[in-house]
Amino acid sequence: MRVGLLKTSLVDYPGRVAAVLFLPGCGMRCPYCHNPGLVEPGPGDLSDDLVPLVAAMDFLERRRGVLTGVVLSGGEPTMHEDLPGLVASIRSLGYVVKLDTNGSSPDRIAQAGADYTAMDLKTDPDRYVELWPGAPADAAHSIRRSVRAVRGSSAQYEFRITCVPGFVGERDAESIASLLEPGDPVFLQRYRPGRVLDRTWAAGVSPYDDATMERLLTIIREAAPKARIRGF
């Protein structure tokens, strides 16, 4: 397997200096995805910069004592059946491991054995079919199961909501809030334009203003009082 490698990050693993491994492949096709080369590889995309997994592991071995965490992102890491083995190999080097997931494979979240799990809540669960080609008939149920799996595991966790116009409006936020419990750590983040999977989004969609973000936060806080906006 070949992976993307971000050698140093101060923001992807809370409280740690970490490396990020980007695993290719994703069953979803979010038009605003910022890693299109991992979703639909093509010439000139990030796929051209992928390195063999063995090279990434060699890097991690050399950086022990400098880095303390590794983030497995994507793409969607849970698409890979050998994810638990990869997590175990990284942990054997002395790192703690964070898993970023879209929640499409609830049974594989706990199986991964990560120390920290961050799950994206993309929209109203009943709308996931708009982002997930070939979604199972029970897609909404799968997302709800994933939320429970994240919360019920022994790992630290957070839920992330990227407030994308058209997918996270006030009604969507109400539906997302129905998934949450008072103790859940929840972070809202603003949609960022730029290089995305659907190029029409690059120029055609603007981020929400501060007032709209605050309204969405108020809705989410009705279910999860600790929720806050990341980056404000």
Image (cartoon, rainbow, N blue to C red):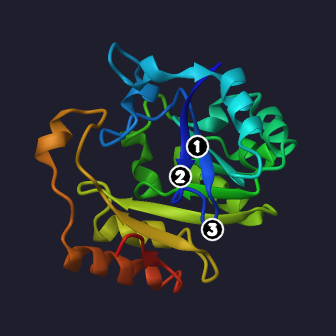
Judging by the rendered image, the residue that carries numbered circle 2 is: 9
* Residue 127 can be seen, yes or no: yes
Residue 36: give x, y in percent of width and height: 37, 30
- Give the residue at x 29% y 71%: 170
Question: Badge 1 local density, few (<14 within 10 Å), some, or many (20+)?
Answer: many
Eyeballing the image, is 116 above or below 232? above
Residue 206 versus residue 70 in the image, above or below: below
Residue at label 1?
Answer: 20
- The circle drawn on residue 15 is 3
Amino acid residing under circle 1? Val
Could you tell me which secondary element the residue under label 3 belongs to?
Answer: loop
Q: Earlier in the sequence, mark 2 or mark 3?
A: 2
Q: What residue lies at 76% left-to-right and 46% top-to-bottom?
A: 64
Q: Nearer the viewer, residue 43 or 189?
A: 43
Q: Mark 3 and mark 1 in contact (Cβ < 8 Å)?
A: no
Residue 31: quadrant of the picture: top left
Q: Reply above or below: 102 against 225.
A: above
The residue nearer to you, when weighing 44 against 175, is 44
Within-10-Å neighbours for mark 2: few <14, some 14–19, many 20+ = some
Residue 51, quarter of picture: top right
Q: Assign a secondary structure to mark 1.
A: strand
